[in-house]
Image (cartoon, rainbow, N blue to C red):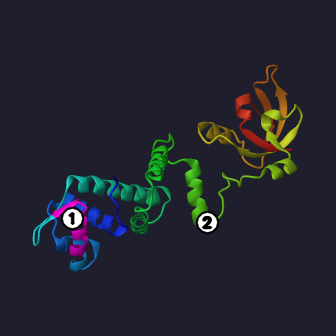
Amino acid sequence: MAISMSPSLEDYLEGIFIIQEQRRIVQVKDLAKFLKVKAPSVIEAIGKLKEKRLVVHERYSYIELTQEGINLAKKVHERHKTLKRFFHEVLGIRASIAEEDACKIEHYLSDETLKRVLKFIEFIETCPQEQPEWLSSFYYFAEHDKRPDSCPKRVSQEENNRKKTLKLSDLKVGEKARLIKITDTGILKRKLLDMGLTRGEEVRIEKVAPLGSPIDIVIRGYHLSIRKEEAERIIVEK
């Protein structure tokens, strides 16, 4: 049966765990200093934790976590660290604020949400690029309140219909269009950008191979040959 814990008691439990990890011995005065509270408040909280069999403490002696207390304290502490990492390392929030906000939120986060946050952090950290381009674009947007040129605003279906946007692979020989965006976010996008396929450039279909690939295009007066799979990831406006 799950133990009912208030946010305040979870803070005390986590505090004992952290001090115990650092010094092994925890006294009332240590916990009061760590949590920035008065000694009577610590004694009252320790009494409640004793009732829940999470700590062992005799008058004027050290405070120790029971095995159940250790398990619960670890869970609270891991949740805290995960949230701080997410706020600081992913969202780019200052470490001091990330620490404070993690402490406020950690008590109300479900296990399911915490696991998803962990997966999100793992996804970013294991990306082939050192920092995903979309994440760099978010940092730019957060700082400047506008999108970088490499990350145009997603248009609605209505706007798409009005502007007659389509894939470059859908154009017929001789047709011209203006490049809107490249939908790929990895190595392919970098390759296409390096070839000069940047937003706003006009392209013309010069020739299409009998089987549909490759496709010869003209951009900036130069002839380029790209595969059909690449052309399908290039959105243009006629």
Query: Can I make out residue 33 in this image?
Result: no
The residue that label 1 is drawn on is 50
User: Where 138 sits versus 41, above or below?
Assistant: above
The tally of labels here is 2
**Magenta residue span:** 42-56
Q: Secondary structure at mark 2?
A: helix
Instruction: Give the image location of residue 169, x and y in percent.
Output: 79, 33
Instruction: Give the image location of residue 154, x and y in percent.
Output: 72, 52
Instruction: Give the image location of residue 80, x and y in percent.
Output: 37, 59
Q: Main secondary structure of the magenta part?
A: helix
Queried whether the magenta region covers residue 73, the answer comes back as: no
Query: Can I make out residue 122 in this image?
Result: yes
Report whether 162 appears left or right of 13: right
Q: Residues within 10 Å of mark 2 (few under 14, many from 20)?
A: few
Q: Secondary structure at mark 1?
A: helix
Instruction: Give the image location of residue 179, x and y in percent.
Output: 77, 45
Task: Give the image quarter of residue 45.
Answer: bottom left
Q: Residue at (15%, 69%) from the top-left corner?
A: 27
Q: Which mark is residue 144?
A: 2
Three-letter code, disc 2 = His
Nearer to us in this view, 70 or 180: 70
What separation in Å lies between label 1 and label 2 (alpha carbons)? 51 Å
Task: Give the image quarter of residue 213.
Answer: top right
First in sequence, mark 1 or 2: give its number: 1
Task: Give the image quarter of residue 79.
Answer: bottom left
Nearer to us in this view, 62 or 18: 62
Q: Which residue is outermost to the front?
A: 1
Three-letter code, disc 1 = Lys
User: Where 122 sits versus 226, above or below?
Assistant: below
User: Where 227 sits versus 43, above or below?
Assistant: above
Q: Report the mark closest to the observer, 1 or 2.
A: 1
